[in-house]
Image (cartoon, grey):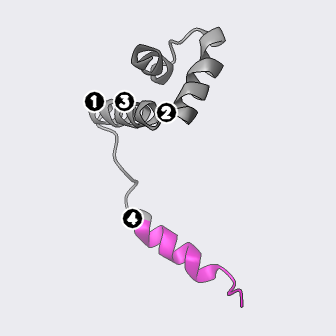
C-alpha cells in the first residue's frame, strides 16, 4: 500500500486506484502518517520553504481585523 501512496503523492497512481488508496489511509493512521512523511520528503527535496516570509505577522494582522464574538 505504501507504494500506492507514494505514487499518489507523485501524481502517478492509476485513477481507478485513487479512491481505494484514500479510503485505506482514512482507516489506517500508519498509512496516513506515510502520506505526511512523503510530502515532507518532497518538500525537502524541492527545498520548498515551510511558510512564506512574515507568515505569522500577516496572520496576526488579519486576526486584528476580525470582529470580536461575545
Q: Which residues are magenta?
A: 56-70
Residue ID for mark 4: 54
Q: Position of residue 59 (x, y in %)?
A: 50, 69
**Mark sitting earlier along the chain (4/2):** 2
Q: Residue at 39% x, 64% y: name it.
A: 54
Q: Residue at 46% x, 35% y: name it.
A: 32
Residue ID for mark 2: 28
In the rendered view of the protein, which quadrant contains the N terminus? top left
- Dominant secondary structure of the residues highlighted in magenta in the image: helix
**Mark sitting earlier along the chain (4/1):** 1
Q: Nearer the viewer, residue 59 or 3?
A: 3
Indicate which label's residue lies in the foreground, 3 or 4: 3
Residue ID for mark 3: 38
Indicate which label's residue lies in the foreground, 2 or 3: 2
Q: Position of residue 31 (x, y in %)?
A: 44, 30
On residue 45, the disc is: 1
Left or right position of 3 against 44: right
What is the distance, in whole Å, between disc 4 and disc 2 at their CAs? 36 Å
What is the distance, in whole Å, between disc 3 and disc 4 at their CAs? 26 Å
Amino acid at each position: 500500500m505504501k507504494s500506492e501512496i507514494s505514487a499518489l503523492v507523485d501524481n502517478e497512481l492509476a485513477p481507478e486506484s485513487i479512491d481505494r488508496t484514500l479510503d485505506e489511509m482514512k482507516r489506517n493512521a500508519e498509512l496516513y502518517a506515510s502520506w505526511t512523511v512523503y510530502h515532507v520528503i518532497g518538500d525537502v527535496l524541492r527545498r520548498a520553504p515551510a511558510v512564506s516570509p512574515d507568515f505569522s505577522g500577516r496572520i496576526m494582522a488579519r486576526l486584528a481585523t476580525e470582529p470580536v464574538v461575545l
